[in-house]
Amino acid sequence: MIPHPAQQDPCAEVAPPVVLALLADIFDALPVAVVIAGARREILMINREAESLLGYRREDLLGQTIEVLVPDGLRPSHIESHHAYLEHPAQRQMGANRDLTARRADGSLVAVEIALKPLAGADGPMVIAAIVDISTRKALEKQTREANMELDRRVLERTEQLEHSNREKLTMLNGLEQARAELERISRQDPLTALANRREFDQRVALEHARSQRHASPMCLAMLDIDAFKYVNDLYGHALGDEVLRRIAGILRAQCRAVDVVARYGGEEFAIAMPDTGLDEALTLCERIRCAVHSHAWCELRPELRVSISIGVAVRRQGETASAALARADGLLYGAKRNGRNRVEAS
């Protein structure tokens, strides 16, 4: 640094003018803005880069307090900071961890980082401040933050769209699964009585028949038919006839076991498959069903209404197919009708 004339020691050896000129050129050519302030905060020297950064001519700054370069609201605190720094001078970096700005000649603010270095002078301590313009870096950091925020927003928006789409797909799949299950149920269930339909009954009877053969266990099949049901429909109408069918289905559900397969086989005809059941047990169950139908309170539908059923029961024979056993039960059913109805025939 070129000493201020007032700071020169008259006894000290004076550097040759050529050296002083070289030092002045070097100071002015530094690629970083440098401001040197004295103990009373007065600006002693600035270089050309500082003029360019701050927008001042050096003659306009020399002798002014350093606070001319500090934003208005921060000047009182800067004076205190300057005094504190002179009490404990040390190399220090400012602006790395917090935003720092310098005030330019036109009043605008520029983002900076400042490196402080104490220097002993003839009239007291001095402070060298190297000032770096970081406004471009700050602008890039801001653009990066905004770009990251926009990216986060788009990612969140897209994620929400995908989650919404996935929820819609899951809802649709659940709906399709429910519809499939409902179609499967409809395909296996009689819509009027909610009993198994003929298709479901035949499939389950085939499985139970195979199991009965495999384990040599007994199995009985029963066919039931409502006596004179055509007369009920013709006399009272199909709506009442449907209610009779529903009530008989309820009686069958109440009387049969959970392992029994109960179905509306067609029209006014019902069928029961009784796994692990001998003929005597099957007769007891079917007689109980017949009595329950005969004694039911049909007068709730019509005071004069009476309903009975005829039943044929067949036990599975060795080597006999399921369809053959069911055909025998059907034959026994019509035998019960020929023998007076409202009765059970077994073989």
Image (cartoon, rainbow, N blue to C red):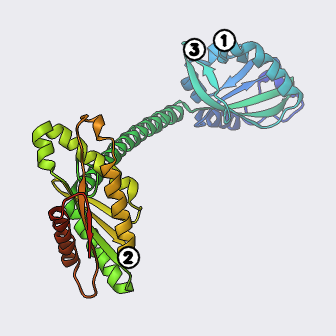
State the residue in front, 300 or 44. 300
Q: Residues within 10 Å of mark 3 (few under 14, many from 20)?
A: some
Q: Is residue 122 above or below residue 205?
A: above
Q: Is residue 125 above or below residue 272?
A: above
Q: Residues within 10 Å of mark 2 (few under 14, many from 20)?
A: some
Q: Residue furthest front?
A: 340
| Residue tagged 1 | 72
- Residue 314 horizontal/vertical position (percent): 26, 74
Q: Can the viewer see residue 239?
A: yes
| Residue tagged 3 | 105
- Residue 99 horizontal/vertical position (percent): 64, 28
Mark 1 to mark 3 CA distance (whole Å) = 13 Å
Q: Is residue 277 above or below residue 344?
A: below
Instruction: Give whichever of discs 2 and 3 has the lower sequence position.
Output: 3
Tag of residue 80: none
Tag of residue 278: 2
State the residue in front, 81 or 305. 305
